């Protein structure tokens, strides 16, 4: 008997538009260091590889570097503030919830594979009323590896009860698409996320512009 197909989604910039809350937190941290805030459009391009990398990139954009111990302090401050404000403005993308229901109704397992911390991911999804929809929710700290390492994705699929060859990864950046390719998983890139380069250049199997295109694109797997 075949394992049910599995739909795996990235979180920030894919399932949810979380940039406003992430950028607000980043600029708060930069201000505390006496660093000028980043414009929204520039800061959004720093999202994707976790908060610590976002802070380092934000500082770097202003020509500032900090040693690892200071970065750890800034990271802790970021997490503390963000955890209290992560759902201030963050919402699922248009059509996302309806698409999840389409796949669930068709017998698919649903999972999240994100470079956000697992605890923050679960908290955000719970606040948005979405956590119970997913058979697995894996963050950067769940398996000791993070995307684009394919093990992050393949272990998430395993935890959801699926198989890589019967799964689809949906994401918005090269981090997601590269993990899928290396893990032998079909991929869909969304054009409305936070990729710093055109998503058509990522090499995904499919590109969609709205969630209402997702099921008709890969739902017959």
Image (cartoon, rainbow, N blue to C red):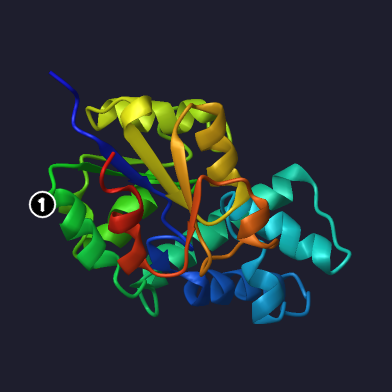
Q: In the image shown, does 22 or 44 lie closer to the viewer?
A: 44
Residue identified by numbered label 1:
105
To which quarter of the image does residue 91 belong?
Answer: bottom left
Q: Quadrant of the N terminus?
A: top left
Residue at 27 percent across and 48 percent down: it is: 219
Asked if residue 12 is positioned above or below residue 185 in the image, the reply reads below
Q: Position of residue 113 (x, y in %)?
A: 40, 43
Q: Nearer the viewer, residue 78 or 96?
A: 96
At 63% from the left edge and 57% from the top edge, which residue is drawn? 200
Observer-nearest of 58 and 155: 155
Q: Identify the residue at image location x=52%, y=71%.
A: 19
For this orientation, the residue located farthest to the right is 63
Quarter-of-image position of residue 153: top left
Q: Is residue 183 above or below residue 102?
A: above
Expressed as whole percent of the image width and height from the top left, the position of residue 115 reads 50, 46
Q: Is residue 196 visible?
A: yes
Q: Position of residue 106 (x, y in %)?
A: 13, 47
In this image, 143 relative to 99: left or right?
A: right
Decide which of 59, 69 is in the foreground and name it. Answer: 59
- Label count reads 1
Q: Residues within 10 Å of mark 1 (few under 14, many from 20)?
A: few
Regarding residue 146, the answer to whether it shows in the image is: no
Q: Position of residue 124 (x, y in %)?
A: 32, 61
Image height check: is 86 above or below 68? Answer: below
Quadrant (top left/top right/bottom left/bottom right) for the C terminus:
top left
For the point 21% across and 60% down, the residue is: 130
Callout 1 secondary element: helix
Name the outermost residue toward the top: 1
């Amino acid at each position: 008997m075949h394992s049910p197909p599995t739909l795996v989604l990235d979180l920030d910039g894919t399932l949810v538009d979380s940039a406003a809350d992430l950028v607000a937190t980043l600029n708060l941290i930069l201000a505390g260091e006496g660093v000028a805030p980043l414009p929204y459009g520039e800061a959004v391009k720093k999202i994707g590889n976790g908060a610590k990398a976002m802070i380092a990139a934000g500082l770097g954009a202003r020509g500032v570097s900090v040693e690892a111990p200071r970065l750890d302090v800034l990271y802790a401050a970021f997490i503390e503030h963000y955890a209290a404000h992560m759902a201030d403005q963050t919402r699922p993308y248009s059509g996302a919830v309806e698409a999840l229901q389409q796949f669930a109704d068709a017998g698919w397992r649903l999972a999240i594979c994100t470079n956000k911390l697992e605890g923050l991911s679960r908290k955000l999804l719970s606040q948005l009323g979405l956590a119970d929809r997913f058979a697995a929710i894996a963050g950067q700290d769940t398996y000791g590896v993070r995307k684009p390492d394919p093990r992050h994705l393949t272990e998430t699929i395993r935890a959801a009860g699926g198989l890589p060859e019967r799964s689809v990864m949906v994401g918005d950046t090269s981090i997601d698409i590269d993990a899928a390719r290396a893990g032998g998983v079909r991929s869909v890139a969304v054009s409305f996320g936070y990729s710093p380069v055109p998503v058509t250049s990522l090499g995904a199997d499919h590109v969609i512009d709205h969630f209402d295109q997702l099921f008709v694109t890969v739902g017959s797997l």
